[in-house]
Amino acid sequence: MRKIVISSLCALSLGVASFNPAIAAKLSGTECLAPAGAGGGWDFTCRVPAAQMMQKLNLIDGSMKVVNMSGSGGGKAFSHVVTTRNTDEKLIVAASAATATRLAQKVYGDYEADDVRWVGALGMDYGVIVVAKDSAYKTLDDLVNQFKSNPRRAAIVGGSSVGGWDHIKALLIAKEAGIKNLRSINYIPFDNGGKAMLEVISGRAAAFTGDSSEVIGQLKAGKVRVLAVLSDKRIPALGDAKTAKEQGYDVVGGNWRAFYAPAGISDASYNNWVSAVKSVAMSPEWSDLREKNGLAEFTSFGSDFDGFVRNQIANVAAISKELGVTK
């Protein structure tokens, strides 16, 4: 069996500069922009490690405002930052592997990695395949067999655009299962994972492809069941959910959780944001919250993270072409 891994999306051991939590001057009136609606991974990234943890750890002065701006798979927010907030030193924006995927596939038009400054990552959100609690699909094999026999009857939904990271995760499973026509997989995109999951809970879709942190709430509420986790080992926050590897599908893929800032801010402000994200990432408080929300450990900051993102974009462009989601 050939292992299918988006290596740049998986937990990596990256060299980072020695940790120095010192922040030259605490920022006040800060804002975190979540490029999607409430309930998804970007919203979580702004509200928990940014707004909640930075205030709790006294890294910012006062509270942080969180603004949701959905549209174009994060493209509306990216454009807003570049064209309107390019020098706003009090702004950070939630980012993830999905951001790099869309830049790689030119979903954001002519915008590139150079148009923002990449601050840092503080967790890895492994992919999941989820169904409603009472779904007829009891195992990953059940769902894959439906893909093979009549894929139109098994709509799978996610919070990314066609060809985006959530879509790619489903295609990787299908490819590992030997399905040749990946375009036959019936994927329906939504603006964010929260909306997509409601389609599964309501019975309008067969399965949800998303990230671990997006399903914790509905899993605890007993409304969904995790068919597979796309990680090397099980994730405690997801209970007894099996990995895809345990079920014979050697697919691993994670979605890093991170931040970028406007390109036109000063080096001093950029370094302040890098230090703040480092401080959160290294704190025991965040470690506890990260694990409770199903995120694995993963850190990268400043120039190291910038290089990681650029490598990610190049790799995703090649993978997207191989999977037939871009030309």
Image (cartoon, rainbow, N blue to C red):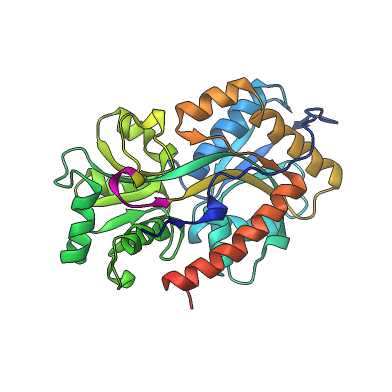
Q: Is residue 264 above or below residue 240?
A: below
**Residue closer to the observer: 281 or 24:** 281
Residue found at the very far left of the displayed protein: 136
In this picture, residue 297 sits left or right of residue 84: left
The N terminus lies in quadrant: bottom left
Q: Is residue 33 above or below residue 176?
A: above
The residues colored magenta run: 246-251
- Rendering quarter of residue 201: top left
Q: Residue at x 35, y 48 (%)?
A: 195
Q: Residue at x 37, y 38 (%)?
A: 215
Residue 85: say if magenta: no
Residue 63 point in image, percent of width and height: 65, 27
Q: Is residue 156 above or below residue 63?
A: below
In this picture, residue 72 sits left or right of residue 237: right
Residue 75 visible in the displayed image = no
Residue 121 point in image, percent of width and height: 63, 42
